[in-house]
Image (tube, grey):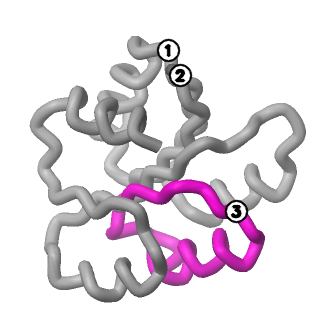
Amino acid sequence: MPKNIIYIENDLQLRESIVFNFKLEKHLVEDFESPKKALEFIDNLTNFTIDIFIIDFQLNDLNTLDFIKELKNRNLNKPILVLVDNMMFKKSLEKLSVEKIISKPINDIDILNELINKF
């Protein structure tokens, strides 16, 4: 079943690759390089219902933990998948009720699609 996804990743090449594959699977994706741009989009939503967030842990203009807190403060109670290079932040993410922590690199887009379809 196609999902409406907010995907935040500052690595342009990776973001374009994953978005391309999501769209092949018929998911609707709004992708952003920064959490601040994503928050601006979320604050102005009219015709897009969010099903799931996929967020890279290392972002540029706002700490990922603070971004997740912002989502919670806005009562956006949707599943959050976080992509991490280093699992040392796992406990901090778990405290924020993140649904899934995925270790990078992501070798297979099917893994992400499988996870998305669980939520």
Amino acid type assigned to the residue bearing label 3 in the image? Leu
Report the Cα–Cα distance between label 1 and label 2. 6 Å
Do tag 1 and tag 2 residues touch (Cβ < 8 Å)?
A: yes
Say whether disc 3 or disc 1 marks the residue closer to the N-terminus.
Answer: 1
Q: Position of residue 59 (x, y in %)?
A: 41, 67
Q: Position of residue 106 (x, y in %)?
A: 16, 43
Q: Which mark is residue 26?
A: 1
Q: Which mark is residue 2?
A: 2
Span shown in magenta: 56-81
Q: Depth-wise, is mark 1 or mark 2 nearer the camera?
A: 2
Q: Position of residue 28 (x, y in %)?
A: 58, 25
Residue drawn at x 24%, y 65% is 84
Residue drawn at x 72%, y 79% is 73
Q: Secondary structure at mark 3?
A: loop
Relative to 94, residue 76 above or below: above
Residue beneath disc 3: 76
